[in-house]
Amino acid sequence: MKRLLDMAAKVSDQAEVFSNRNDSSSLEMRNGKPSDISASIQSGYALRILKDGRIGTSYTKNLLNREELVSNALDSLKGKVKAGFSFPGPSEIPSAWEPDGSVSRMGFHDLHSRSSKVLDYMRGKIDGQIDVNTARGVMNMAIMNTNGLDVSRKSSFMYIFASLLFPNTETAVRKLYLSRKVGDFPESDLDELIKLYTSGLPEVDILTGRMKVVFTPNTMYTLLWRLSAATSGGAFYNKVSPLMDKRGEKVLSEKVTLYGDPTEPEEVDQHFFDDEGVPTKKHTVFENGVFKNLILNLDYADKLNEKSTGTGYREGMWGGETIAIPPGPSLKCSRIAAGDASFEDMIKGIDRGVIVLGVLGAHSGNILNGDFSVGLNPGLYVENGEIKGRVRDGMIAGNVYDVLQNIESVENRLHDSFTGGKYPSILIDDVSVAAK
């Protein structure tokens, strides 16, 4: 990296080299039998240069030809993409949690053992199909730039993802166990999954109308996708956010506090700098319903005459090569603050409503404006505090800024979500529910 940086420094005003290496493996068991095994090692290097107020980029999966990488970055300057920011210099960055090696030593036998424990616990308790996906990974990342920054981080993870499929469907109730160390799925969480599955076995038809709706952690991205889009620096720079000129105003229920904090001691991917080398800290976007802060990377912070919020990351909505994606505004390690209601009490308080356990079509609607219209996949119907069964062909629709004004209660516990982040379930009143 140092040699590449030195070469780039000779032909630019500033230069940055980003490298990453991800080593992962996974085992998928469908209906109790292995159906897919995969292992991969991905690595690469990305170069960014600043010259005459413009930015040039290039990337490669190896460093066999550094000259070509620098040449490609210089060629990309012809695109005349303006950049008024500077790369950050060194700063006091605490040491993150160091992986203990237990995850890196996991083999397919270990993954199979973890999956088998889930299957053994579930068998005899339900008659349906049980799918379990188990994976482990170790990630290494480093950044160097010509302003003296030289940082690196390493993290590890393992997860077990359990799905209970309803008969003759691909619709399922699902739950994720995520850890930075080797561990087993808590039996209490599996018991909760079994209870929801059993409650959803009967199919029920319901009447279209407005009713109470519970968004569970795995469906929270339906709402957060829209909030993140509107609070991104890009939306403000292009003046297309519905929250323009509303910073400091209450725009959601006081029960909503949304933040990201990669520095939390128990965070699986704990880190103290983002993918641009900017120090991270707890970053609150909405506090008790009040719109507090934008999500900014270096580029949009400069364009808006503000400071980066340490939220510049190389990631895309639909995945992709990390090194090929330029750093953009993104709220990492996101959280919705817990409330004071148990999940059981939330359900008991519903006279008529649905529990949203999965959605179809979260990408539909005007995301930036906050609109959504999604299918229930599945949704459980609740009447007088009791789950009656699984809704047949249901949908919910609304606007995130309207529905998040009508929050009745927020669960007192956070759960890992397979879309990232930790969230509670949220009970919302007066949501439009459509059914056949």
Image (tube, rainbow, N blue to C red):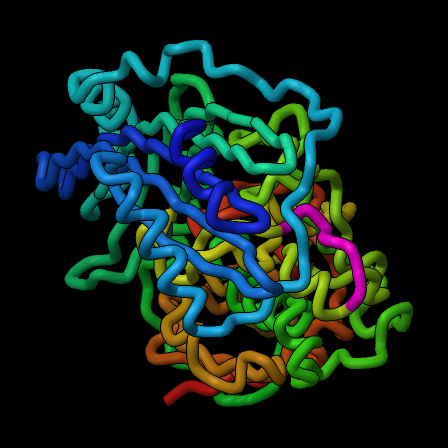
Q: Quadrant of the N terminus?
A: top left
In front of the other: 58 or 388? 58
User: Residue placed at 20% from the left, 34% from the top?
Assistant: 40
Above or below, 268 against 405 in this view is above
User: Along the horizontal axis of the image, is 349 left or right of 109?
Assistant: right
Q: Which residue is found at the position 38% from the left and 76% from the top?
A: 361
Q: Residue 432: which quarter of the image?
A: bottom right
Q: Which residues are magenta?
A: 305-311
Of residue 422 and residue 238, the one placed in the foreground of this image is 238
Q: Residue at x 36, y 67 (%)?
A: 377
* Residue at 58%, 37% in the rendered image: 146
Residue 158 appearing in the image:
yes
Prevailing secondary structure of the magenta residues: loop
Q: Looking at the picture, tell me which residue is in the foreground, 324 or 81.
A: 81
Q: Which image quadrant: the C terminus?
A: bottom left
Measured from the top left, where is residue 380 in percent x and y?
45, 65
